[in-house]
Image (cartoon, helix red, strand yellow):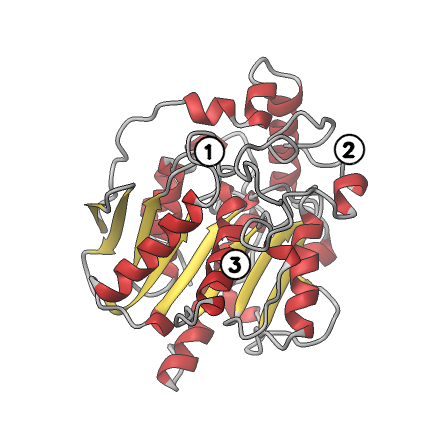
Amino acid sequence: MALKGWIKKYEHQYHEVPASDDLNAPEDINDDVFSTDDEREMGDDEAAGVSNGGRVLSRMISYISNESLIGKSLKTGELRKKMTEPEWNVPEPFNLTSFDLGNFTMKMLSSKENPDLEHVVLQLHGGGYMGAIRNAYYVFAGLYNELSHGMNVCCPDYRVAPENPYPAALEDAYATYKWLMTKAGYKPENIILAGDSAGGGLCMALTMYLRDHGEPLPGGIIAMSPWTDLTASGESYETNYDKDPLYGGTKESLIYINSYPGDHDKKDPYISPAFGSFKDFPPMLIQVGSNEMLLSDSETVAAKAREEGVRLRFTVYEGMFHVFQMAYTAIPESKRAWMEAGRFFDVLYREHEQEPVY
């Protein structure tokens, strides 16, 4: 599968990064995407080591977050919260429509040609529950749309802390999910939740909330570097403390100092899904970098989910940093992660339609 040319305009910020490393097409991913054993799944890139582009980009991120003047504000989330962006320039293949749901707004990205009107991706953005949606997530939406063969992608700009602590984000995610079913007419099994970092954890928290309240569950979950343990108690918070180029080397970051939980118990599964049950969950794809302090967040969830019978694909990308998928297709590891997400969509298509997409 070759991604269309529109994505290249968003990779100019990585022009310093070598992108010549060869990457196999998604067909080399086994048809049996889901694993049921207790060993983590490793991509080919992990066995082969880190790409040159991945190393360079990791060093760039480390320099910006640890040695530049904006490093501290980047780690705490203040930089993102204060930054302003111009309106996103919608690429030619897509339409972007806005909706007002009262407490928050959202946008729906759709294909101009051959849209899939039966399925939808509900994308919950990252940002540590403290940052609003950014233009990068509309690029994510374009990739989800293309790799899913034309699914609409719904992007809520849910309320964030400190102005709106828990349960505001969960309430807005739930409101969006209900809107997709009742107003937009999507069947719940045709709604795919996708999120990175806090958004990945929020996908899991939303699914737990739906299950616990007798609501129909989504058809699948894609979680990229999900933040599932706001107590920061996993082993990797120590073992990767000096490896993580983005959050490592300090405890003055949003993964330690965060206003989202407010006065609530951080171990509440609706805040930290790692402490909850994954019984009856839909199929999940979880991707994480081996150098992340949040690596344990994914490992804990994957182990629990497998033990409870969830169909799961869990891939650890060697040498990668938090939400390395933000490099789009500029480095081999990120490109492979997106191709893996596309393969996940294909497996869900087979499950829903009882026939392969290709």
**Residue 325 against residue 357 in the figure, above or below:** above
Nearer the camera: disc 1 or disc 2:
1
Mark 1 closeness class: few <14, some 14–19, many ≥20 residues within 10 Å? many
- Against 233, is 222 above or below? below
- Please indicate, yes or no, whether residue 114 appears anywhere in the rendered image: yes
Q: x, y percentage for residue 264?
A: 57, 43
> Where's residue 293, x and y in %?
70, 41
Q: Measure the C-alpha gap from mark 1 to mark 2.
A: 28 Å
Q: What residue type is disc 3 on?
A: Met
Q: Which residue is mark 2?
A: 242
Residue 204: which numbered mark, if any? 3
Mark 2 element type:
loop
Residue plotted at (61% across, 16% down): 68
Sequence-wise, the earlier of marks 1 and 2 is 1
Quadrant of residue 213 in the image?
A: bottom left
Identify residue type, mark 1.
Ala
Q: Earlier in the sequence, mark 1 or mark 3?
A: 1
Mark number, residue 161 = 1
Total residue callouts: 3
- Residue farthest to the top, as pictured: 69
Marks 1 and 3 sit apart, C-alpha to C-alpha, by: 19 Å
Disc 2 marks a residue whose amino acid type is Asp
